[in-house]
Amino acid sequence: MTVHTDSRIIAAPLDEVFALVADVERYPDFLPLWREAEIVRRWDGGYETQQVIGLGPIRERFNTRTVLQPPNQIEVTSDDRLFRTFFIRWDFAVVPRGCRTGIALQWEVGSPRLQRAISFLLPGVARSMVDAFERRAGRGGPLQVV
């Protein structure tokens, strides 16, 4: 199992970037692969979400648990039967030009066929997720990848 990471500076305030990543119900509006996201339960410091990701005709529904540690970290896990392992960690830090935003992404699914597709796509997924949040922050062109 491999962990894929990406980190870059987004020219936006840390609290704005944190809020964008925490707003899971908006993911289908701008995030590659996300088709549906609905918070089904909230508690102080987090929430549970039912999500659907899709690529072409393939659609997979799963549940996640998100723990918010404002303003510096968001962790997303799933014990859904679709996954053997599912872990996403977002880290945020103030830097002179904005917010250093990092993601560590680890997915392993039970289906060998689906796992082959995910293993092939996962490096690009981590990068495209940060790209999408960078665009969503609406702060101009591409920034230096750190």
Image (tube, helix red, strand yellow):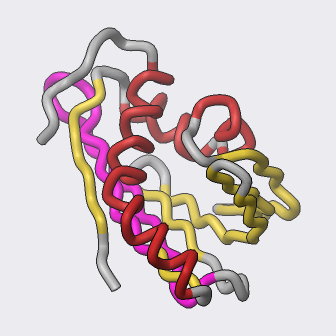
Residue 64: x and y, percent? 68, 69
Frontmost residue, 118 versus 11: 118
Frontmost residue, 20 versus 93: 20
Please determine whether, in this image, residue 100 is positioned above or below residue 42. Answer: above
Please determine whether, in this image, residue 124 is positioned above or below residue 142. Answer: below
Q: Residue furthest top?
A: 140
Residue 144 colored magenta? no
The stretch in magenta equals 83-106
Quadrant in the picture for residue 137: top left
Residue 92: x and y, percent? 33, 47
Quarter of the image with the N terminus is bottom left
Residue 24 lies left or right of residue 113; in this view the side is right
At 29% from the left and 51% from the top, the residue drawn is 102
Q: Overall secondary structure of the magenta stretch? A: strand
Frontmost residue, 15 versus 138: 138
Quarter of the image with the C terminus is top left
Residue 101: x and y, percent? 30, 43
